[in-house]
Image (cartoon, coloured by chain):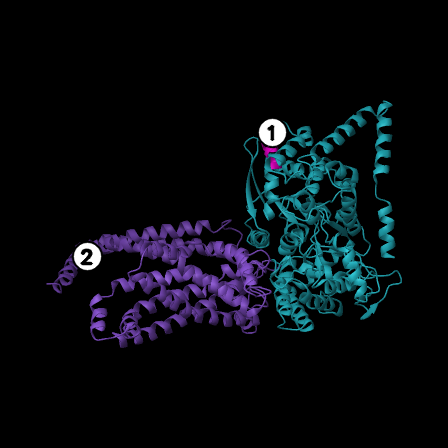
């Protein structure tokens, strides 16, 4: 059923032929004169998108600050349409965001430089490492010391920020400028909104997709060895976690291109709470039942499910797989598995956000190039039903539940600018520039820390024109779209303190993976600590917000 | 002559005080009373405002700081008015006293207050008074006790660092070639930031895949040179890195002690027929004991604060094997925003360190007295 849905969905994707047909029709309409202005505008936009997609061109080295500025300059059109030159002279704004892998804020600086030059506003920057971001934001919220006007933030914090009235409501002109209706369905309200008000300029769409090495899974010698080892199925990309485990165990001791081959790479080392997502990706197919929206807590009580058989099975999978992974895997966090291992040619399967696909193809830091394929996360032959306490085998086949981890980054304007009309407009103009439709295309094409999040990002021809291989990019984008639109997607709960839950779990998980406690005991410890935390934060409120985040 | 000076000084002071007119004294006392009243009033207003008992108050606590500075100034002026010349002398000391009150004593008292709160930054209700709740939680916190256990290992390892540093100090105090060059070279690790060391050594040199140390270990026959994958290996690797940074510090202090040691004693030992070991064990080491104990205590204080290398390289893992109290508290604060509990852990740790060091100082006093 799920695979069928997936395949059916893929069939609806625009391919080169349909896009060209559409373009030809539009052109014909334009030449008829009836829609002359419209067609000119559309053509100009198409030209602009094609132009920025060539900066610097995929496979032509990592983009530089000069490239970011150039893209920012070219995408100033919507700003120029609504703001007069020098209109914000004298306005000073403070922007808080990340500096992960020298991306995020570093790109924003480049994009906003032409905006500053045009509008006359000045921006000062607060750059934070990923691990420092959460505490800095929490402290600012709790102590009422918000010292920034614009904030790069993930949707999980919307409960903390928007729920406390710290964010500024998005004006209608911004919605129009950024074409908010272009966002993919799963990033539309309630994401980005609070009590019916819109706060977020979405610049990212997050899900963990399954990244695998195409050369490993098409290697004839490995295929033969696989058969020789008595395996019944064909050698190929695993579609279920059971197959992932089998392949990981099989690859230990094998060689690929004269190097040690490894299968799946786990990330057992804590990563400021973000590492928990990687266990979540292993667990979602076991724990997220199609008939149940919840998978992390019971909806009505916030009783943790982390110690139910599904999660414990996922934890046990990690324990079982670790001996077959590189010897120092216990000291690997997701940054290591993604950027120091997988992109460096070690390991053949990891779950990660869309960064892997961007960096593999469009950054000098990758050595594996385009021998990467993508899919939605593997499924499971059976899925745990929390309501009945039984493992169900679905008639439709393996259960898939893509982990929509983090719900992506957004740009938010803080309420503190509300009292100053000029500053308010300037802050929203800057946010709208960063979240502009065309600029966003460039951001999701090149290493930026952000992945596709608009319907318009899935026009494959634009990616191919930029230099991506069609097969590669089709696989990449379909894996994301397949996750976003999956009917059984596992969605991030937007509840306050969610990273505290994750951080506590990470600590206990390291004990489990180091063999100090067994999977069930460790999971019980996490559950007990989560219960305490829920009481400390406020159970009733958490239940309400959890329900809202699941749309219940 | 030496004994008579303070008496004269005292007499002079008494006369000076007596000369101060009673009116000035009264004005001084009134100034202190007025300033104290004003300060307390402003403080009370702000406390009532913060606790929502009254609507009026300041938007932040900055006015309290200004009130404190005004009070401090008034107090200083009052000292001159009341005590005359002695008051003027007190002016040299008062800034330091006020500064210490502001940045040490007040934060400590405030810290104790925070430690009594159940305060998670994400909590809807904000901070709630929990009395000894955090301490009870600490008693049941296996992570804290695990970290404390690790601290014992790290603290004991200081003895190893001391032994190596002593060896190096002896070497550098001997008449060897390029002695000055080696002194500078051996000091270099101390000049590096532990964070830089974490990356250069922990995450580069010792890196399993491409690290030169790992490559060398493979060459020497260690098939899987994973320096941070097993508990004891990780603990030893962290200790080795911290030792590399810190040994030069111990070494330089010991070297200074060796340089200050009278040569006659060593020569007398030689004349008496002592060999190198006997000369070291019965002469050099006992004479160096006061310096050694001082440097050991300083080093243990530093060691008890170990966090940076652990946070950067292992994040406390695997399975808490390398965790330190400071790195655990850091996680409680940073990743879990658990301000009340984190402060309570830090306060308890502070008390433990004070008790431990007091004991060490007393013991060291005994040892050094015996030696002397």
Check residue A53 for magenta coloring: no
**Label 1: which secondary element:** helix
Q: Residue B100, position in %: x, y?
A: 36, 57
Q: Residue A410, position in %: x, y?
A: 67, 45
Q: Which residue in the protein does label 2 denote?
A: B17
Start-end of magenta stretch: A110-118
The relative height of residue A106 versus residue A488 in the rendered view (above or below) is: above
Q: Residue B41, position in %: x, y?
A: 42, 55
Display colour for chain A = cyan
Query: Tag 2: Cα neighbours inside 10 Å, few (<14), some, or many (≥20)?
Result: many
The relative height of residue B49 versus residue A363 in the rendered view (above or below) is: below
Check residue A111 for magenta coloring: yes
* Label of residue A118 in the image: 1
Query: Tag 1: Cα neighbours inside 10 Å, few (<14), some, or many (≥20)?
Result: many
Q: Which chain is purple?
A: B
The quarter in which the N terminus of chain B is drawn is bottom left
Instruction: Give the main secondary structure of the magenta stretch.
Output: helix
Mark 1 touches mark 2? (CB < 8 Å): no
Query: Tag 1, which chain?
Result: A
Q: Residue A5, position in %: x, y?
A: 86, 53
- Please tell me which residue lies in front, B298 or A496: B298
- Please tell me which residue lies in front, B245 or B20: B245
Left or right: B268 as drawn, with respect to B141: left
- Please tell me which residue lies in front, A344 or A45: A344
The quarter in which the C terminus of chain B is drawn is bottom left
Q: Is residue A187 visible?
A: yes
- Please tell me which residue lies in front, B106 or A321: A321
Left or right: A149 as drawn, with respect to A465: left
Q: Is residue B333 visible?
A: no
Q: How many marks?
A: 2
Query: Tag 2, which chain?
Result: B
Residue drawn at 89 percent across, 63 percent down: A395
């Amino acid at each position: 059923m799920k695979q069928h849905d997936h395949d059916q969905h893929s069939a609806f994707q625009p391919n080169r032929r349909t896009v060209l047909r559409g373009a030809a029709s539009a052109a014909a309409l334009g030449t008829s004169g009836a829609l002359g202005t419209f067609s000119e505008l559309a053509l100009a936009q198409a030209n602009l998108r094609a132009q920025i997609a060539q900066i610097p061109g995929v496979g032509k080295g990592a983009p530089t600050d000069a490239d970011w500025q150039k893209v920012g300059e070219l995408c100033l059109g919507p700003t120029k349409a609504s703001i007069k030159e020098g209109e914000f002279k004298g306005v000073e704004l403070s922007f808080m965001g990340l500096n992960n892998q020298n991306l995020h804020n570093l790109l924003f600086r480049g994009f906003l430089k032409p905006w500053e030059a045009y509008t006359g506003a000045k921006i000062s920057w607060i750059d934070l490492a990923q691990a420092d971001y959460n505490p800095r934001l929490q402290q600012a919220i709790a102590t009422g010391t918000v010292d920034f006007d614009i904030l790069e933030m993930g949707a999980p914090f919307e409960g903390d920020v928007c729920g406390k009235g710290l964010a500024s409501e998005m004006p209608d002109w911004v919605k129009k400028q950024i074409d908010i209706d272009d966002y993919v369905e799963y990033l539309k309200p309630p994401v980005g909104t609070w009590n019916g008000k819109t706060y977020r300029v979405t610049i990212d769409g997050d899900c963990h997709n399954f990244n695998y090495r195409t050369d490993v899974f098409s290697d004839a010698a490995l295929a033969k060895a696989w058969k020789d080892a008595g395996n019944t199925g064909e050698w190929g990309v695993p579609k279920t976690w059971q197959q992932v485990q089998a392949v990981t165990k099989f690859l230990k001791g094998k060689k690929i291109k004269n190097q040690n081959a490894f299968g799946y790479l786990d990330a057992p080392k804590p990563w400021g709470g973000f590492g928990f997502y990687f266990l979540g990706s292993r667990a979602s197919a076991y724990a997220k039942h199609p008939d149940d929206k919840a998978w992390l807590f019971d909806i009505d009580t916030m009783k943790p499910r982390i110690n139910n058989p599904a999660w414990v099975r996922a934890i046990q999978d990690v324990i079982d797989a670790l001996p077959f992974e590189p010897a120092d895997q216990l000291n690997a966090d997701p940054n290591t598995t993604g950027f120091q291992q997988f992109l460096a040619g070690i390991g053949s399967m990891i779950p990660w956000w869309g960064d892997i696909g961007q960096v593999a193809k469009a950054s000098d830091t990758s050595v594996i190039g385009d021998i990467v394929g993508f899919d939605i996360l593997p499924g499971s032959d059976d899925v745990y039903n929390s309501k009945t306490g039984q493992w169900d085998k679905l008639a439709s086949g393996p259960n898939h539940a893509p982990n929509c981890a983090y719900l992506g980054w957004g740009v938010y304007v803080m309420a503190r600018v509300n009292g100053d009309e000029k500053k308010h407009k300037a802050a929203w103009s800057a946010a709208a520039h960063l979240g502009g439709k065309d600029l966003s295309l460039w951001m999701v094409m090149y290493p930026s820390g952000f992945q596709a999040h608009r319907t318009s990002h899935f026009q494959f021809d634009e990616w191919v024109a930029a230099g991506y291989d069609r097969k590669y990019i089709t696989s990449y984008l379909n894996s994301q779209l397949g996750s976003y639109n999956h009917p059984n997607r596992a969605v991030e709960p937007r509840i306050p303190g969610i990273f505290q839950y994750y951080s506590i779990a990470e600590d206990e998980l390291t004990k489990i993976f180091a063999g100090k406690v067994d999977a069930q005991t460790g999971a019980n410890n996490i559950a007990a600590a989560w219960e305490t935390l829920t009481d400390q934060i406020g159970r009733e409120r958490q239940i309400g917000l959890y329900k809202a985040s699941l749309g219940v | 002559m030496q004994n008579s000076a303070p008496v004269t000084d005292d007499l002079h002071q008494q006369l000076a005080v007596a000369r101060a007119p009673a009116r000035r004294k009264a004005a001084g006392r009134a100034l202190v009373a007025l300033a104290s009243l004003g300060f307390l009033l402003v403080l009370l207003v702000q406390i009532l405002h913060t606790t929502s008992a009254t609507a009026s108050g300041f938007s932040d606590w900055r006015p309290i700081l200004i009130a404190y500075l005004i009070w401090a100034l008034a107090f200083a002026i009052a000292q001159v008015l009341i005590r005359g010349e002695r008051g003027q002398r007190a002016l040299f000391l008062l800034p330091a006293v006020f500064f210490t009150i502001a940045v040490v004593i007040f934060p400590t008292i405030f810290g104790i207050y925070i430690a009594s709160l159940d305060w998670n930054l994400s909590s809807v209700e904000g901070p709630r008074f929990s009395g000894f709740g955090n301490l009870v939680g600490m008693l049941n916190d296996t992570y804290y006790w695990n970290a404390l256990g690790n601290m014992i290992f790290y603290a004991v390892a200081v003895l190893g660092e001391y032994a190596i540093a002593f060896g190096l100090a002896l070497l550098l105090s001997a008449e060897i070639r390029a002695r000055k060059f080696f002194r500078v070279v051996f000091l270099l690790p101390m000049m590096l930031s532990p964070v830089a060391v974490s990356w250069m050594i922990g995450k580069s040199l010792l890196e399993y895949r491409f690290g030169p140390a790992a490559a060398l270990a493979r060459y020497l026959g260690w098939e899987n040179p994973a320096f941070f994958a097993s508990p004891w290996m990780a603990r030893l690797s962290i200790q080795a890195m911290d030792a590399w940074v810190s040994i030069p510090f111990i070494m330089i202090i010991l070297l200074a002690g060796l340089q200050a040691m009278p040569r006659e004693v060593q020569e007398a030992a030689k004349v008496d027929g002592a060999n190198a070991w006997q000369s070291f064990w019965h002469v050099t080491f006992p004479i160096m004991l006061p310096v050694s104990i001082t440097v050991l205590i300083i080093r243990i204080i530093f060691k008890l604060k170990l966090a940076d290398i652990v946070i950067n390289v292992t994040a406390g893992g695997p399975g808490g094997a390398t965790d330190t109290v400071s790195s655990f508290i850091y996680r409680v604060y940073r990743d879990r925003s658990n301000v009340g509990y984190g402060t309570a852990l830090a306060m308890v740790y502070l008390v433990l360190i004070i008790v431990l060091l007091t004991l060490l100082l007393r013991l060291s006093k005994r040892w050094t007295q015996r030696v002397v």
